Amino acid sequence: MTASAQTFVPHASGARCSAWIERFAGLVAPGARVLDVASGHGRHARLFAARGCRVVAVDRDAAALAALAGEPHIETRVLDLERGGPVLGGERFDAIVVVNYLHRPLLPELLATLADDGVLLYETFARGNAAYGRPANPDFLLEPGELLQVIAGRLAAVAFEQGHVCAVDREAVIQRIVAVGPGRRWPPSLPAGSAPGTAAVE
């Protein structure tokens, strides 16, 4: 089924967590400080808070962030990540989570805020997605292998996927990566289901 541009709201209230993020959430230790970028209503912020992490949920939509009011272990910040110049004030985070969001000028700052042994979990749309709806603007679509290029020389990839996916509600073209900093003990522990001879792709 192909979704129209009007039917897909990537950060809508009630949206389920990304299976990719859930699968690798175990790489983020309880007590870790997590930055949830373009958090929306906070589905991933809640996921990590429930795992004992301290989450900073950032979005420019104050109404969406209001859904997180009073949630334990979650700090919300109304922030325009696209205003230009540094926006995170040189803070450091043990993990950074980005889902369904791309602003290329922000990527260097995100990597700079990640702790030396930190974890990057990223999933968003890629070139070819225009055939299935929004986003269709190339500014918001990753080029093939782009996330690997972004982390090259800075982080080590733990898992990477790109291509066409067909979910219950829509089709899309996505790219996703999990990567760790050079200070991370190697090798990282992979989630159950990643052993040789088992299916590792959702």
Image: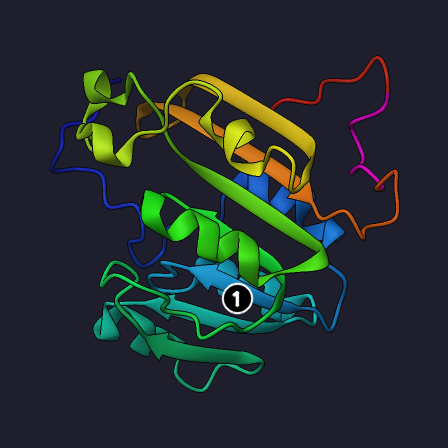
Residue lying at 38% horizontally and 68% vertically, measured from the top left: 58
Residue 29 appearing in the image: yes
In this picture the colour scheme is rainbow
Magenta residues? Answer: 189-195
Q: Quadrant of residue 89?
A: bottom left
Kindly identify which residue carries mark 1.
46
Q: Which quadrant of the figure contains the C terminus?
A: top right
Please state the horizontal and vertical placement of residue 66, each as a whole percent of the image: 30, 78
Viewport quadrant of the N terminus = top left
Q: Is residue 9 left or right of residue 4?
A: right
Residue occupying the point 61% across, 63% down: 48
Q: Circle 1: is it few (<14), some (14-19), or many (20+) Cα within 10 Å? A: many
Q: As displayed, is residue 169 above or below residue 8?
A: above
Q: Is residue 193 magenta?
A: yes
x 25%, y 66%: residue: 80
Residue 194: image quadrant is top right
- Name of the residue lying farthest toward the top: 197
* 74 in relation to 25, above or below: below
Q: Could one spot residue 16 in this view of the protein?
A: no
- Magenta segment: does it hold 190? yes
Q: How many marks?
A: 1
What's under tag 1, amino acid-wise? Answer: Arg
Is residue 170 or residue 135 the one in the foreground?
A: 135
Q: Position of residue 87 (x, y in %)?
A: 36, 69
Give above or below for 80 relative to 196.
below
Rendered residue at 77%/47% (across/down): 182
**Main SS, magenta residues:** loop
Lateral position of residue 76 relative to residue 116, left or right: left
Q: Position of residue 17 (x, y in %)?
A: 49, 49
- Residue 55 position in % (x across, y down): 55, 72
